[in-house]
Image (spheres, helix red, strand yellow):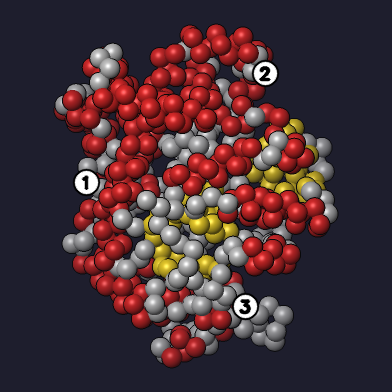
Amino acid sequence: MPREFRGGRHAGVLVPLFSIPSRASWGIGELADLPSFARWMRDARLDFVQLLPLNEMSDGQNSPYSAMSAMAIDPIFIAPASMPDVAALGGEAMLRSDERDALEYARAASGIAYGAVRPLKRRVFRAAFQRFVCEERDRSSPRADAFAAFMERERWWLDEYTLFRALHAREDARYWLEWPAPLRDREPAALDDARRELANEILFHAYLQWVADEQWRDARAAADVGVFGDFPFMVSGDSADVWSRQQDFRMDASVGVPPDAFSETGQDWGFPAYRWIEVAARGDEWLAARARRSAELYDGYRVDHLVGFYRTYVRERDGRSAFVPGDEPSQIAQGERLLRLFTSTSARIIAEDLGVVPDFVRESLARLQVPGYRVLRWEREWHADGQPFRDPSSFPATSVATTGTHDTETLAEWWDTAPGDDRHAVARVPILRTRGCSGDEPFGDRVRDAFLEVLFAAGADFVIVPIQDLFGWRDRINTPATIGDSNWTWRLPWPVDDMDVEVEARERAGFAARLATKHAR
């Protein structure tokens, strides 16, 4: 049953699923690891976890915000140790010696070794699928019936996704724009031929989504905490969604953000631009489908790049750029139409409204009672003398208080590098002052815990603390505008199933629980 998050004060923790592997995991946090993390969360009185997107990424891609499907769960998160078909084949004993070496390497690596994990799992999943077909599907077993029921229930998104994945594999992972014209242009006869020729491959990808669905449902039931997902603004152009809904996207333009204080040239994300007029004319079908899927998977979700749904910064190939729609009334109308669509489901919505966001967007969020973000280090009276930091106790109830996001530097890193004037200014926030924090004090346990109390005491109904900030760690999830092996690869320093015995983790759980109790969360 979905958990209700439409009233009361809540405290949650931000952590990517990939960051919480257990001893049984194959080098990455898996769906089956969520209950172990949730057990620690319950000790900490944290009632929901904010995950990053679980959408399927393409080979060689680590960013969960560049997905080849807005609907499918990435099979990399499937737990082989929890698969009946893998168990029937002998579990890890089925691995060849080179595969055992790869698994040992992935488990021992300092971060997520995607290049080792993905091909290893794919080989095992192929073997598991063949076993399922021979021993279950061909014999019409109860598991085969459950698989058939899943395919029928989810065909509204599964049919296009599995066909795309099968074609993508046959075409050597080439961008669909480079496929033969009949497939690129989705000629019905060519698609019918592909479905017949690739029936087994299509079934394989459906099987993986069924396994992921079963494991996800089991994990959520066993976790017994709220689970929030992430609703990315876009998916990759080379995705099942864009290929199957070409009428909704411009392939001759891309989206990004304009120049601002952080970038003189702005950013070009390379994603195809929405054809907003056509999207609206078709009743926002794709976005409605995504909202439905997200509400089925999560108790709530964060709407990424919220401002983009009001106005999208579109970059033309000739260098021109502009916001679409182009005028404020149209932007408000569009954004509120889409937000009402998102909020019409059972899931609780929170809006990532960070960066350069016009005042009318935040006014719109307030009208619709959708919580927006309040990042402690950025909440200042910018037009007042000295630009003092706002006291978080004054944050509106309909908001989300946090120390940072997956894209920001950690609290420790920010404190270490912040100008002295900023540190002295933030130290005037009442709770920090009461705790005796000084802008001259180096980052340590006292500064960390003082900031955490400020966060839990905030007026916002929702508090989300990045797990690094709860512990005072300096490791980052992602450094924007950079490409490197460290992005999207961070994981806990110990297996997640050891958190209830690790001294540091137990102490942090106890501290968070005291704050949650003290501040009625």
In the image, residue 3 sits, relative to residue 202, either above or below, namely: below
Q: Which residue is mark 1?
A: 23
* Label 2: how many Cα within 10 Å (few below 14, some 14–19, many 20+): some
Residue underneath mark 3: 380
**Helix, strand or loop for disc 3:** loop
Q: Residue at x 59, y 62 (%)?
A: 370
Identify the mark nearer the N-term, 2 or 1: 1
Seen in the picture, residue 117 relative to 506 is either above or below; the reply is above
Q: Amino acid at mark 1?
A: Arg
Residue 440: x, y in percent? 47, 84
Q: Which disc is residue 426 wearing?
A: none
Q: Is residue 128 above or below residue 518?
A: above
Label 1 – label 3 distance at C-alpha:
44 Å
Quarter that holds the C terminus: bottom left
* Three-letter residue code for mark 3: Arg
The residue mark sitting in front, 2 or 1, is 2
Of 139 and 252, the residue lying toward us? 139
Which residue is located at x 50 percent, y 52 percent?
346
> Which element type, helix, strand or loop, lies under badge 2?
loop
User: What whole-number distance in Å separates the C-alpha atoms at marks 3 and 2?
Assistant: 51 Å
Density class for disc 1 (Cα within 10 Å; few <14, some 14-19, many ≥20) is: some
Q: Amino acid at mark 2?
A: Asp
Which circle marks residue 185 in the picture? 2
